[in-house]
Amino acid sequence: MFILADDLGYADLGCTGARDAGNQPADVSPHLDRMAREGMRFTRAYANSPVCSPTRFALATGRWQYRLRGGAEEPLPTVMHDKVLGLPPQHPTLPSLLGAAGYATALVGKWHLGYPPAFSPRASGYQEFFGFHAGGNDYFEHCDPRGRADLWENEAPVQRAGYLTDLLSRRAVDFVERQAADRPFLLSLHYSAPHWPWLTRDDADEALRIAGVGKHLDGGSIATYQRMIHHMDEGIGWVLDALARKGAADNTLVVFTSDNGGERFSNNWPFVGQKMDLLEGGIRVPLIARWPARIASSALHNVPNLTMDWTATMLDAAGVAAHPDYPLDGKSLLSVLDDPHAHMPCDLFWRMKHRTQRAVIRGDWKWLSIEGNEFLFNLGHDARERANLKNRYPTMANELRSAWQAWDGSMPSIPPDAQAHVVFTEREIPRASF
């Protein structure tokens, strides 16, 4: 089971340091906190991208998102005009590979990998789909940012009354309850929370006020945002309880993370940057894995890993090989699940058209370039990325820059017509200055 939050900041959970508006500890995620106590929390988990759809390309395929044209969009736009972009149905995916091996597969929630009829969850391996196609969805009206109805069951649009987070949670519970005891399953539960618009269960009137606006520049608060996380956490508790009732909890790998770092109301402490940035606040995300039959309780792991590594991990756990024509870029973390002290040295790479950003992480070292300005940080000593060590350690800076250039040369180039979007044109939170 892979549970994906949308725009959740690193310190937005109780177990990662959530604080309320008064800077007091916030009890926002009791079920996820319990899941962390019962499993392993990853302190160096990174999203494949600081924006949603590229990360989802990597998660679906287990490969660098840059290998697919749609992965160059930052993110895939709601309206693509003359472009037809998405996850090609012929490309092997986590659900298609597991489905071919006998797994029941379902996506509940956000797709954001292209629009029907050219692209859809069911065309890419999910046997069931209940959710929405766009990058965002109103929590009550169930419309995309352009005001178009966007709630689907398989290939049919549907209407359902209720708060979107709860609808997704209940559908996930229904899927778990319907599974046969002798058949394995993959459930992708991809919430819209806590992505804007910032609405709790009690904010139906606010949803009507902003209907058709798409953005929510004049709404929300830390309290509202944290309540949205609490609603999601409560639903995750329902799903975990359903697993327990089925007797499937011990032998089910459950992973929870976010598609990228948080934005306006999120807490990314101690990191700087946010969604759209290759600073730590934009790419370092909370990640919890629970598998009682295999993972020791209250374990911590601090070796860097990427979203697409979990695709490789789940295939490895299922004993399913990747398609030979589409080798995985992600690395299986099964050895880490068995031993949180296992060391898996591996360089992690990113690039963004937005602000011409480039980054590579090697252990504690991070080389970062933003609009041609280069930086070298030691994250083990300086998680806030304040001390630029480029001139102090020029050999390391040169090594990491060269490693990034070699990796970039192995990827398709960024198409000149790729879009670099910012979710809000009026971005109130100042950029970190260098």
Image (tube, grey):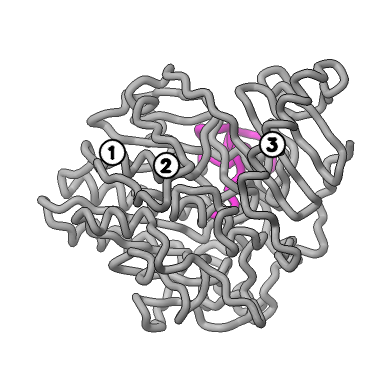
Q: Residue at x 64, y 30 (%)?
A: 361
> Label 3 belongs to which residue?
404
Disc 3 versus disc 2: distance between alpha carbons? 23 Å
> Label 1 belongs to which residue?
317
Amino acid type assigned to the residue bearing label 1 in the image: Ala
> Residue 392 vs residue 308: left or right?
right
Q: In the image, is residue 111 above or below residue 391?
A: below
Q: In the image, is residue 72 above or below residue 250?
A: below
Q: Main secondary structure of the magenta part?
A: loop
User: Reading the chain from its start, which is encountered first: label 2 or label 1?
Assistant: 2
Q: Residue furthest left?
A: 182
Amino acid type assigned to the residue bearing label 3 in the image: Trp
Mark 3 or 2: the one toward you: 3
Mark 3 or 1: the one toward you: 3
> Label 2 belongs to which residue?
310
Q: Residue at x 78, y 25 (%)?
A: 398
